[in-house]
Amino acid sequence: MSHDERSGSGSASEGAAVAEPRRIFWLLRAYGLLSLVSGLLILVVAGLIAFALATHADELLARSHDMTLTLQLSVVHVLVYVVTAAVAVVFGISLLRNHRRNAARYAYGLIALDVVSLVLEVMLRGAVQDALGSIGHIVFLLVVAVTVDPTLIEERRRERAEQEAEDEAAARAGTLGRAKGDRGFIELDFFNLFWVFVVCCVLGLVIETVYHMVVVDPGVYQDRAGMLFGPFSPIYGVGAVLMTVALNRFWRASPVVVFLVAAVIGGLFEAAVSWFMQVGFGAVAWDYSGFTIFGLFPDPIAELMGGRTSTLFMCMWGALGLFWIRVCLPRLLKLINVIPWRMRYSLTSVCAALMLVNAIMTFQSLECWYQRESGLAPSSPVEEFYAEHFDDAYMEHRFQSMTITPEDSARISES
């Protein structure tokens, strides 16, 4: 055999060696088998419990149950546990079959689920005895995710660098955040929509507060905030996101079309939120019953929607939608782009996490307020926390425009 042939043979063998994926360490494969077996056992048990509950559904529904925050969190905890078991099964299979990329991704998923489960444990039990064990498992999964496929991290870094290069070029061209082609005015990505939500939460609160001081009760200030912390009214933030998504393609359309679309979307959204608050919490934050049209005849929209929205406020939604898409959104995009493009994703991630915590605590504090008004004593550390730090007096002062009336809700309660 010639030197070239030997060289060619050697190159071919080296290429095959490079192409063949490295075997996952046997200890990790053993851990994968353990994850697979334990996950399957949990899923089988969960299936048997679900079957038993389904076969006795009529008997369970016939009984009266207090849907307290403790019970709700317990149900969520069980669901997280089941999802974790399902992901653990797929994770174990990936390790056993040497699918390094999938194993790394599922490891990150298990880390997120373990963190959620640990938070729920603290809420339900207070000081968790096995917290160190849970934290150790999270650290172990993180090591697995990093070592089993290190190229995944490098790939994400490369994608992040490419995105930053695109953002830098768009920032220089003045088109950062603009939609490409004929997809509308603004790019409907998480970054843009999150800051639309935040800015409009604040602007909506200011508008509603001024409207109440000038029109509803002249000279009287009332805190119209809708979240536990900060100057935020989430109904306006969510409404602005809905308006942006719905009207983005209509930003060049006729003002009449934009007005009508915004009025319908805003009115239906306001009515849906009012219904949810009353059915879920017995809370009445606004009621337009008895509104009239110029004092001449009853407002048909208010009558039809049970006072959950009105013709006046639907027209206000329409006007706000038109003003929003034509005037505010272009200026808001410029305001958003004041955030340095190198910080836009990290800063948004931190702020989104804080806003999520605020939203969860708002919901939980309202739930505990409802329970106290229903005569139910705290039954878990999380309920005791809200009873101590966010009692009835605090909630009444914070949510001045809201009243909790359990008998108006559609929930089954037994005191």
Image (spheres, rainbow, N blue to C red):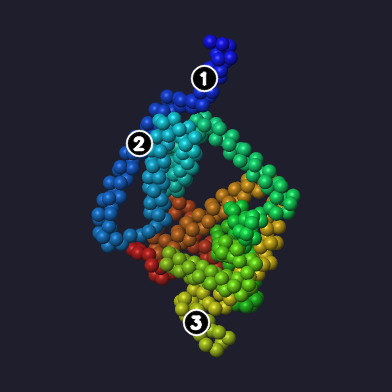
Residue behind mark 3: 300
Q: Which quarter of the rendering shows the C terminus?
A: bottom left
Instruction: State how far apart marks 2 and 3 are (Cα).
Output: 60 Å
Q: Residue at x 27, y 50 (%)?
A: 51
Q: Are marks 1 and 3 in contact (CB under 8 Å)?
A: no
Q: Is residue 336 above or below residue 284?
A: above
Relative vertical location of residue 327 with respect to residue 81 in this rendering, above or below: below
Q: Residue 406, percent across and down?
A: 41, 67
- Amino acid type, residue under disc 2 in the picture: Ser
Mark 1, residue position:
13
For label 2, the residue is 38
* Location of residue 90 with respect to 31 vertically, above or below: below
- Badge 3 crowding class, 10 Å Cα cut-off, few under 14, some 14 to 19, many 20 or more, is some
- Which image quadrant for residue 202? bottom right
Identify the element where label 1 is drawn: helix
- Camera-side residue of 231 and 76: 76
Among numbered discs 1 and 2, the one appearing first in the sequence: 1
For the point 47% across and 76% down, the residue is 305
x and y, in percent, of residue 138 in the image:
48, 36
Q: Mark 3: which amino acid?
A: Pro
Query: Pointer 1 and pointer 2: residues touching (CB < 8 Å)?
Result: no
Q: Earlier in the sequence, mark 2 or mark 3?
A: 2
Residue 313 falls in image quadrant: bottom right
